[in-house]
Amino acid sequence: MKNLIYQKQWDWLTSGIALGLVFLFAVALVKPIGVSTQFVIFDGIVWDFFSDDIAVKNSDSKSDYASTNAYLNKGGGKYAKNIANPLNYSFIFVLAMIAGGFIANKLQSNEANRESMISPPVWELRFGHSPSKRYFAAFLGGMLILFGARLAGGCTSGHMMSGIMQTSISGYLFALAVFSTAIPLTIFMFNRGE
Amino acid sequence: MNILLAIILGLLFGFVLQKSGAANPQKIINMLRLKDFHLMKVILLSIGLSSLAMFGLLAIGIIDAAHISVKASYFGVIAGGAIFGLGWAIAGFCPGTGLVALGAGRKDALFFIFGSLLGAFIFTLMYGELKTTFLFNDLGGKLMLASTENVKYKALFSSAPAFIIAGGIAMVFIAIAWKLPAKSD
């Protein structure tokens, strides 16, 4: 057990069982895991500082909150409600994930392994050591990912993992669409000249 | 109580994603270029196991069917997934693993999160225009393969026992996870 906590990386069997248990606990105790909606909530919390009508109380709305933005007002204003009340399950869950990554990294024994925290080796082999190039790619990739995730209504957690776990058709559709562009582009980007 | 669960489950999820290598873009990129199937095996096994256990516990009434939450199918799921795939290839992070990588101290993850917040904001501004386009045309609604007690969701195989349908699919996932080689040449 001690070894599992300090180990840098688990084998696939341990990882798969642990990840499966987390998804099971989440649906058994609360609801299926989802992440990408909280990026919208975070944006909304920031936006709300600068604007007076992004998340306001409105008794006509199903959630008692409404927004002048069509997306935040969607589904009876449920996003507006979470923006006005950031101490809700889904938002705290995502903040705790960051802390989980922090703790896992702090506890791991990494004396020998000082790998780059800027770009992965496979990236450096193909695109060199320039941090700005890697930062730009990470930024651009992030933009596409969250635009895509919000258009699709979920991401790897909500659509792919939680969705397929529940045998949801949308989960299978999302996974097929993701891999149909991700695999060819990754091969095109990283396999040239090899 | 819910906030306490959010903290415990979120910590656990972040910890496990980091330990499984999912928050390492090297592992993601090498999975997507079909060189290293470690993460593919992890994903398939975890979906298979959690699905098998969930439908088993639903069948004997330990998990409340009200906890089921199935998302709708519409054109945007496919279009959005395709755009997501491009970003996944370029960045090597997805939303959850990017956050975990940020917590683990990766500098590129910080730029990924900035980009993600901007991408989410652009969509938030565009939704009003997009919602009347074909992108939100229905593709079957909130449909699943196996049936549950939750009346909000329709099932494609509504007459067969859910545990058989979902359990069969889960066993296929687990078998592929088991058989898939860890690396390819």
Image (cartoon, coloured by chain):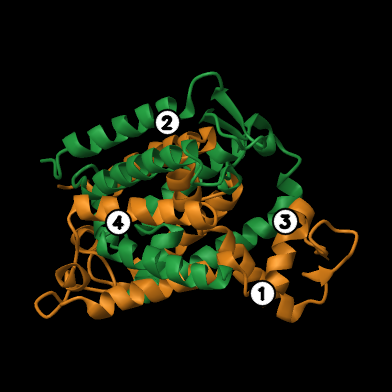
Image quadrant assignment for residue A99? bottom left
The label nearer to you, 1 versus 2, is 2
Q: Chain of mark 1?
A: A
Question: In the rendered structure, are the residues bearing label 3 and label 1 in contact, judged by CB atoms less than 8 Å apart?
Answer: no
* Horizontal and vertical percent position of residue A159: 50, 45
Query: Label 2: which residue?
Result: B166
Circles 1 and 2, Cβ within 8 Å, touching? The answer is: no
- Residue B119 image offset from top left, x and y in percent: 56, 60
**Going by the image, does A91 lie left or right of B93?**
right
Taking the spot 49% from the left edge, 34% from the top edge, the residue there is A173
Specify whether residue B125 is in view: yes
* Three-letter amino acid code at the position of disc 1: Ile
Colour of chain B in the image: green
Alpha carbon separation for disc pair 3 and 2: 34 Å
Same chain for labels 3 and 1? Say yes or no: yes
* Amino acid on which the number 4 mark rests in the picture: Ala
Marks 4 and 1, the one that precedes in the sequence: 4
Q: Which residue is mark 3?
A: A71
- Residue with the mark numbered 4: A18
Q: Quote the CA–CA distance across marks 1 and 2.
A: 39 Å
Q: Which chain is orange?
A: A
